[in-house]
Amino acid sequence: MPARPMHPTRTRRRAVLAAPLLILALAGCSGSGDDTGGDTTAATTGDRSTTATSTAATSTTAPAVEVDQTPPVGANGIKIADDDTVWIASLGSDAILRVDTTTGRIVARIDAPAGSGPDDVALAPDGTLYWTGFLSGDVGVVDAGGDRTEVLANVGSGANPIALRADGSLVVGRAGAATGLFSVDPSSNAPPVPLADPGNLNSFDIAPNGLLYAPSVNTASVVEVDSATGETIRTVATVLGVPIAVRWHDDELFALVLSDSTRVVRIDPTTGATEVVADTGLPVADNLAVGDDGRIYVTGLNAPTITVVGPDGQVERTVRVGG
C-alpha cells in the first residue's frame, strides 16, 4: 500500500483519548471510569453465563431464530472470524457481535453480563473467543460455536487489552487510571497471576516471536514487552499522535494512531521507522484488524461502524453494524 506523509499532531487531538477510556463518556456510561480495586480473584461462572441468538443450526421444522439487528452503541475490539465476518466488542451495549463485513448484518449476538462493558477480544485458532469487560474487570469466553459466554476470571475494573499466547494462556491488561498486566489460564480455575506493570497500554498483540507489542498511550510510543513477565524490553518506535492499537500481520507491525485524523501506521520493528499507509478520515476510532487480503478494518468507538480500508490505502466503504 502506498505511503502517505505524516502530518503534525494538533494539541487538541493529542488530548483525545489520552486515556482511551473516554470510551465510557462517548458510550454514555456514567460513573464507569472509577476504579473498583485491583483484586485478582477468579470469578464464579455458574450464574453469569449468557446465550446468543444465531441464524445457524436450525431444524427443518422450526423457523430460524432472527438475530436482533439493533445497532450497538459503539464498536470497540475487533478480530477477523473468516473471509466474510468479524467479531466486535461493544462496551456501551454489553454485547459481543459477529458481523458480516459487506452488509453489516449481525450474524450472532452474545449478551455479556450486564455492566461488563466488553472492550477487546482475542480469537483462538479453534474459534474460541475471549473478551475483556472494561467496567466489571471480567475476562470472559465465547465457545467456538458462538452460542454462549461465561466469565473465567476478574482482574479489576479497566480490563482492556487481551492477547493469546502460543500455549493457549491469556495476557490481559488494565488501562487508564488502573494499569497492570495479568496472566490468565482459561483451562483452570486459578486466579489471575499479576505480572509487572508496564504502564497504560491499550490494545496489544503477540508477535510470532512470543513478544508482546503494545501502544503505550501516555508516552506516544509502541513498546516491546516480555509477555511472560510483563517487563518492558524496549521502545520500538515513537509516533505522532496517540497510539491506541497494535496488530501483527504477515510479519509486519501496524498501529492505529489518533492525531488530527485516525491513521494506520506501519512500523519497522527493527529500526522504528514509521510510514502512514492509510488515513481513515475518522476524527476518532478504537481498534483495528488486518485481513489476509490486506484490507484493514477499523472500529468506530462511539458509532456502530466499521471502516474498511483497501490494500491500496484508500477507504473502500463504511459498514454500519445492524439496523
Image (tube, rainbow, N blue to C red):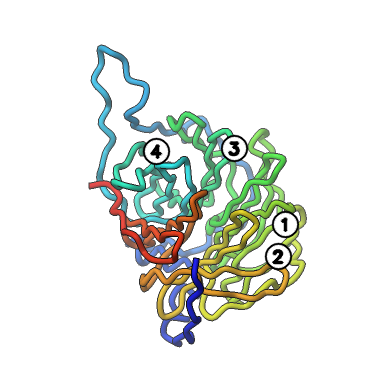
Q: Counting residues from the N terminus, which is met first, the one under dot 3 or under dot 2?
A: 3
Which of pointers 2 and 4 lies earlier in the amino acid sequence? Answer: 4
Category of crowding for the residue at label 3, using alpha-carbon neighbours closer than 10 angstroms: few (below 14), some (14–19), many (at least 20): few
Q: Amino acid at mark 4?
A: Ile
Tag of residue 125: 3
Identify the residue shown where x is 36% and y is 56%.
Answer: 306
Q: Which residue is mark 4?
A: 110
* Lateral position of residue 289 relative to residue 104, left or right: right
Mark 4 or 1 closer to N-term?
A: 4
Please tell me whether residue 38 is drawn above or below residue 79 in the rendered image: below
Residue type, label 3: Pro
From this view, report whether residue 145 is shown above or below residue 117: above
Q: Is residue 63 above or below residue 201?
A: above
- Spatial CA distance of label 1 from label 3 is 18 Å
Front disc: 2 or 4: 2
Between marks 3 and 2, how big is the CA–CA gap? 24 Å
When asked about the image quadrant of residue 272, the answer is bottom right
> Circle 1 sits on which residue?
211
Where in the figure is residue 197, as x and y percent of width and height?
70, 64
Q: Determine the residue positioned at 44% across, 64% down.
A: 312
**Badge 1 or badge 3: first in the primary sequence:** 3
User: Where does label 2 land, which residue?
Assistant: 224
Q: Secondary structure at mark 3?
A: loop
Q: Residue at x 60, y 57 (%)?
A: 248
